[in-house]
Amino acid sequence: MRALRQNPPHSSKTMADPAGEDPRLASIELQQLWFQLQRRQWASLVVIPADPGSSAAGVATSLWKVGTLIGNPAPKVLNAERMGPGVIAELIRDLANAKEAVTAGLDQPRILVSIESVLSNPLGIGIAQAADAVLLCVRKGRTKIASARRTIELIGRERFLGSVVLNKTR
C-alpha cells in the first residue's frame, strides 16, 4: 500500500460528524483503503498509531470523509485520544452495545474511533478489544518495528484488518 499523508488531528470528544468537512476531498488512496476495509464486516473500527505520542485522528477523520460519501447510514467518528478512564469505560460499553445492535440486524451507522498508542495509554487496549476491528497506523521512517509488533501483541493479532503506512510528518 502506498504511503499516505495524515491530516492534522481533530480534538472532538463526542461522536459527531466533524463540522465543515467535505467528503469529496478524500484522497484516492484513502478511498481505496475504505474499500479494502469493507472486505470484512465491522460496525466499529479503531484506528491506532503504533508510536507513542502520535495521533491517528487524521486517518480516522479521512476515512469518515469517504464513508460519508458512500455509506448509508453515514459513519460516525470519535476521537478518544486522551480520554479519562470513566469515559473510556463508557465507550467500551457503547462499542459492545453497537456490536449487539448489528448482530440483532439493526441498521446502525459504523463508528470510527481514533485512540492513542496503547504503549503510552494501555486503557486503549480495552477500546480496541471491544471494537470489531483495528487498523494500525505506522509512520515511514519513524515507527519502530518493535512498537508495531508490541501493539499487535497487546491487542491481539486477530483484531487487526491491516496497517497503513503514513509519510513522516511530525
Image (cartoon, rainbow, N blue to C red):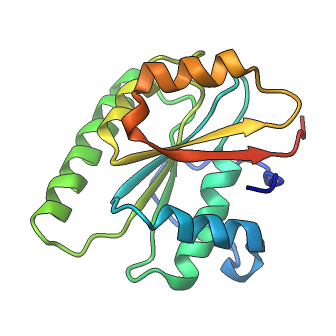
Q: On the rendered image, what quadrant is the N terminus found in? A: bottom right
Return the x and y of residue 17 as percentages of the image width and height. Answer: 54, 67
Q: Quadrant of residue 102?
A: bottom left
Q: Residue at x 63, y 59 (%)?
A: 61
Quarter of the image where one finds residue 158: top left
> How many numbered discs, if any?
0
- Image coordinates of residue 42 in percent, x first then y, are 34, 59
- Residue 89 location, x and y as percent? 30, 29
Horizontal side, residue 158 vs residue 117: left or right: left
Q: Would you place residue 74 above or below residue 79 in this image?
A: below
Q: Residue at x 83, y 53 (%)?
A: 5
The quadrant the C terminus occupies is top right
Q: Is residue 19 visible?
A: no
Residue at the left extreme, as displayed: 104
- Residue at horizontal 47%, vertical 51%? 14
Residue 58 image position (x, y, % from top left): 70, 52
Task: Name the residue at 63% across, 71% down.
Answer: 65
Say whether residue 29 is left or right of residue 57.
right
Report whether residue 46 is seen. yes
Compared across the picture, whether 99 is left or right of 41 comes to: left
Viewer-closest of 127 and 79: 127
